[in-house]
């Protein structure tokens, strides 16, 4: 189990953002990014597991959200084609929930539970 989960809430619509592609990556010691796994948000905008990601290690990680297709499917113009959230894992055994609150022209995030 990867111990990284996420969800996306489309704050402009007040609904979860379904079917968004998300990639989980880890930085190697040289600072290069290595893809660990990819998944798509479910109908509730959640990814509860990144299949094949393996266990977390203490390192910088990145979630890359491909949001342009999500807004394109709704015929909504948006400013950001993708969102990248970089976070540090210092306690690999802990759960790391990284939500994305999204609108066509802005986003925010936090460490959830």
Image (cartoon, rainbow, N blue to C red):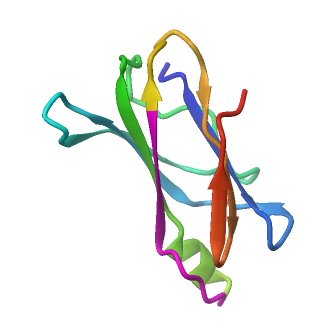
Question: The C terminus lies in which quarter of the figure?
Answer: top right
Report the span colored magenta. 75-87
Residue 95, image x and y in percent?
60, 19
Tell me: residue 69, above or below residue 61. Answer: below
Residue 66 percent coordinates (x, y): 47, 64
The image quadrant that residue 56 belongs to is top left
What residue lies at 66% left-to-right and 78% top-to-bottom?
104
**Residue displayed at 68% across by 64% down:** 102
Left or right of 100 in this view: 44: right
Q: Is residue 78 found inside the magenta-colored segment of the image?
A: yes
Considering every residue shown, the one lying at the far right of the view is 14
* Residue 90 included in the magenta stretch of the image: no
Q: Quadrant of residue 72?
A: bottom right
Examine the rendered structure and indicate whether residue 72 appears above or below residue 12.
below
- Name the outermost residue toward the top: 93
Q: Residue at x 83, y 62 (%)?
A: 15
Frontmost residue, 88 versus 20: 88
Eyeballing the image, is 57 above or below 28?
A: above
From the viewer's side, name the closer residue of 32 and 5: 32
Q: List x then y, in percent, for residue 7.
A: 67, 46
Residue ID at (47%, 67%): 82
Q: How many marks?
A: 0
In the shown orientation, is residue 92 left or right of residue 29? Answer: right
């Amino acid at each position: 189990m990867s111990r990284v989960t996420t969800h996306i809430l489309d704050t402009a619509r007040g609904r979860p953002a379904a079917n968004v592609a998300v990639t989980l990556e880890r930085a190697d010691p040289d600072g290069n990014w290595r893809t660990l796994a990819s998944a798509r948000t479910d109908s509730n905008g959640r990814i509860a597991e990144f299949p094949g990601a393996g266990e977390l290690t203490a390192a910088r990680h990145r979630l890359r959200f491909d949001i342009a297709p999500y807004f394109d499917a709704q015929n909504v113009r948006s400013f950001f084609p993708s969102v990248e959230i970089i976070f540090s894992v210092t306690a690999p055994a802990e759960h790391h929930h990284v939500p994305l609150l999204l609108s066509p022209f802005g986003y925010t995030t936090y460490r959830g539970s």
